Structure formats: structure tokens, C-alpha cells
Image (cartoon, grey):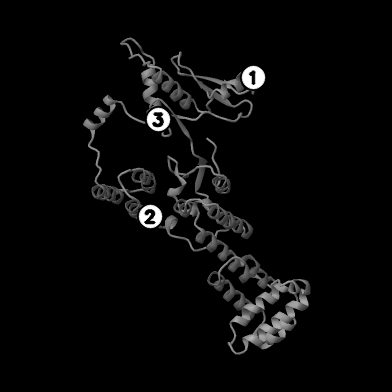
Amino acid sequence: MNILNGTEAFAALAAGQQIECRHINAGEFDDIRNFPATVYINPEYEFRIAIKFFTIGEMQVPEPVKESPAKGVQCFVPSILTEELSKSFKWKNSTSDLALMQRGQVHLIKEHAITHALALITVSGGSLEAPTANDQNSTSNDVEKKTFESQSDIQIAEQGPAAAEDSLTEEFVETDAVKLVEKFTAQIAQFANTQDVLSFRHVFLANGHLDQKDQQHLCKLTEDKLLELDPEQYTPKVEPANDLSVDELKRLQEEAEKLIQSGADSTEMAAQVDEDVVHQELLADLLDRVAKATTPAEVNAQIKYTKSWTEEQRKPLIDAINKRLVELNPPKAQSSLAVRIQKAEDLTELDALEIDVSACDEEIQPRLMEMVEKRRLELDPFTAAIGGP
């Protein structure tokens, strides 16, 4: 199993791969759409590309490898004529190895090859012999049973009549959504550790009798329970993340926008990428840079990262820039706005002064804007001549 970090998982998602995620202390992976977008920058989560399946008869079999593994990697092929139901070999990229891969016989996980063999036996009309009284070794029935009980990623598409009858006599399956919510709510309330809460999320999220509203309600209950059991870890953090740079956060935001523009389903994208979270992370980092800036030019330079933002999104940063400029240049020593416009050294500084103009009295704004346009023409006559900003 190839474990991915947040950056690798996001890139794979953007490339069209189906991604699964889990907390590092959780046992099973779950669809990435069942997690908030913040998991991409949370080191406590890990990712993998979801295992794909194909159907043989009535069984779901994990897909075999379609690209050559590295030399020396342990591989497995289904074996329907042996008790083990699989044979292992080390990949040498030989002609015979490539032939096996082309025929769809090579797996990287032994249990996947066993499941493949079981499916081939079943679809061929065969069956596995029952164990004899003197047989002290594991029989093929034992292999089949252990395989399906131990592998969470091996699924049976449809139970046979006998299996279905046994399951009905053993336990009544509740299908009423109201009763299910009540049952799950009571279970959540009884948990005494966070690991049980995290694992339980997969139970109700996989229940086909609950709608999205019910699942969201239960997710909220698990979040409250996690906060109750471990407030230090699960209290929402307001500090900016320090493990990603401004450029990295900006790149994530741009990739999120590209995914939305590509026409992907809006519901799925809302679950996969939360643009507001990325924006808030970027804003927090910019605010921190402004607060630590030691020169006006360094303060004003932070505005260049917000060209695609709305006026409302920019406002907190603009307020912070103005405040820091006042701290660096107290009002008593600061020139008038008109003088600063006339003496602006570059277009970045002029853009910041134009923002200050918008905060002035409406009666003097036209005159100040004329001075801004005049200074822009002086600083960059070519761009102004062809109608540039």
C-alpha cells in the first residue's frame, strides 16, 4: 500500500484519481469526500489511491496491476489448482512477467490474488471441498473464510441464498432512519476514547438507509464527542498553519479554482476542496507577514498576492497594511496623501496608495485619483498608453 502525504494526495485528486483518507490512529481508510478540506494540511492524516475492483461472476475482485512494478518487488498470481490459491514471485520484468501482467494476473497483495482465484473457481462452476476429520491443516474453505473476514477492501457483490438466510436469522437489519439515528446517537454518547469515535464514523457513513442530513447530524455529534474527550487536540485552532508557505497555499487555491472550472460536480467539489479554508490560511500568513514587516515597501508588497480576491476578502489585509504603515511612519512625520502619490517610487506602492484614496472623503477622491493616474503614467507610460491598469 502506497501511503501519500497531503500534497501528493491533492495532486492525485486533481489528476482524476479517487483518494481515500484516514487518521493515522484509525484502522480503515474512507472516501476523501467524508473529510474536511483541512486534512490536506494536517499531518495527522494520511492518504492512498483507492483500490479499484472488477467483477467476476458475482464477486468483486481487486484490479491487478497494469504497470510494471520495480524489479525485485514481491508479486502474486491466482492459482486455482493449488491449496494456497496463490503463487508468489519477484518481479524481474521478464517476458513471462509481462505476459502475466497483460493477462491481468499480477497482484501486489497476496489476499487479492486469493480472491481472484476464488472468483475464477466459482464462475467456472467449481467449489471448494469441505475439510475432513483428519485434516489438521488449513483447508481452502478456511482460506476463503479468513480472506473475506480479514480484508476490508475485498467485497462480495451478492450473497448466496444460504448466506442471506443465515444473516437474517442472526440479526434483524434496521432500515428506519429515525431509529437508526437514535441508535447511533446513543452509541456515540457511550464512547470513552477518541479512537472508538473516529472508527465509528465509518459505520454510519456507510449506512445506506441514512440521508445526507442524518449523516451530517451524526458527524456533528462525533465532533462534539471528540471535543469532550480530548479538548486540547480537537478544539478548533485559529492560528495559521506554519507548514505551508504563501506560494504553496496560493498554488492550492489556484488548483481548486481550476477543478471547479473544469466542470466537476459542484456537490463533490464542495466536499473535496474548501476554498474558504485555503483563503483563510493564505490571509493569516499575509497578515503575519505584514505584522513582521520592517519597511513600508515590504508592507505594501503583500497586496500583490490578492489580485484575484474580492473587495470584501481584501479588507482585513488592507486594514492591517494601513495600521502597519502608520506604525512604521507615525502621522506626525508622514507626508500628505497627495505628496506620497506624487513621490510613489513604483506601481506597487501606487496601488497601495490608491486603496488609501478609496478611504478618503468622497469630495476629494476625484482629485486624488487624477493624481494617481498622472503618477501611473509617469511610472509606466507604455502600459498606460495601451489602456493597461
Q: Residues within 10 Å of mark 1 (few under 14, many from 20)?
A: few
- Residue 205: which numbered mark, if any? none
Q: Amino acid at mark 2?
A: Glu
What residue sits 45% from the left and 48% below the top?
33
- Residue 223: which numbered mark, if any? 2
Percent from the top left, x then y, of residue 104? 53, 25
Camera sees residue 138: no
Q: Which residue is mark 3?
A: 150
Residue 132 falls in which quadrant of the image? top left
Above or below, 140 relative to 69: above
Q: Residues within 10 Å of mark 3 (few under 14, many from 20)?
A: few
Along the horizontal axis of the image, is 208 left or right of 349?
left
Q: Tag 3 or tag 1, which sits nearer the N-term?
A: 1
Q: Amino acid at mark 1?
A: Thr
Q: Which residue is mark 1?
A: 95
Camera sees residue 123: yes
What residue sits 59% from the left and 64% below the top?
285
